[in-house]
Amino acid sequence: MIIAIDGPAAAGKGTLAQNLAKHFHYAFLDTGRLYRAVGYAVLQAGKDPSDESAATREAKSFDPKSINKILSNPALRDEATGNAASKVAVIPAVRSALLDLQRNFAKEPFFEDGTPAKGAVLDGRDIGTVVCPDADVKFFVTASAEVRADRRFKELQEANKPADYDTILKDIKERDERDSNRATAPLKPAEDAYVLDTSHLNAVQVFQAALDHIAVNHE
Ligand code: DC
């Protein structure tokens, strides 16, 4: 069983994906973290995230066995890393280097400790359209840019990190623009995706709506 969850930054995909993975006892892969790890590695090497050869080199150097360790780096959550991720994600060679990794996970999912799982939840931008077009369930989780910026702003405030709403909103809009208009695997709902607008829903309501959809359509 594969559940694909796509949508723009800060729409609530990650929370929904983790809730569903926990509920069904499936393994979870936040594919944005793969792109973030590439963006981070490029920045650490002192290169520009739009530099094709530097980004491709980093994407190809991932060892699937140490993926959990690479993805657990807390620096991957930073806004600067998210922006770098969105830039490396435009590069087709980076996307193809990460594609096998994601498809292998979907085919043979495993938990963080390496034990196999009987299902997987993947979240990202192109899971339902490109990575797992045959996924059993597809969600497209979205919300207005203003609501998403407000959520990010509050998250940062709660973590006692510097936060400026206008800058966050500007970054979110730029990221949406880049993610939606790139030539390879742009952000868009799969034709058979169930669209969940979370602008006026909290995390519990989103989870419930997703469970209802699965119960009615897939069980
Ligand atoms: O979901 P996120 O904010 O962690 O993703 C960071 C960036 O990675 C996002 O702006 C676009 C890119 N990305 C992608 O192109 N395809 C995916 N499946 C996941 C993320």
Image: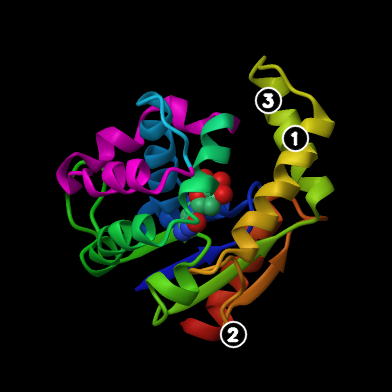
The residue that mark 2 highlights is: 191
Q: Disc number at residue 196?
A: none
Find residue 110 and report its horizontal and vertical position in percent.
23, 54
Q: Which residues are magenta?
A: 50-79
Residue type highlighted by circle 3: Leu
Q: Position of residue 208 (x, y in %)?
A: 64, 62
Residue type indicated by callout 1: Ile
**Callout 3: helix, strand or loop?**
helix
The response on whether ligand 1 sits within 8 Å of label 1 is: no
Give the camera-side residue of 186 and 52: 52
Magenta-span inclusion, residue 63: yes
Mark 1–mark 3 CB contact (< 8 Å): yes
Residue identifier under label 3: 156
Q: Nearer the viewer, residue 22 or 158?
A: 158
Name the chief secondary structure element in magenta.
helix
Label 2 sits on a secondary structure element that is loop
Residue 151 against residue 15 in the figure, above or below = above
- Real-space Cα separation, disc 3 to disc 2, in angstroms: 34 Å
Q: Please state which of residues 29 and 189 is positioned toward the viewer in this rendering.
A: 189
Distance in Å between CA atoms under marks 1 and 3: 10 Å
Q: Quickly name the residue at label 1.
A: 168
Q: Nearer the viewer, residue 177 or 68?
A: 177
| Horizontal arrangement in the rendering, residue 158 relative to residue 88 (left or right) | right
Q: Amino acid at mark 2?
A: Glu
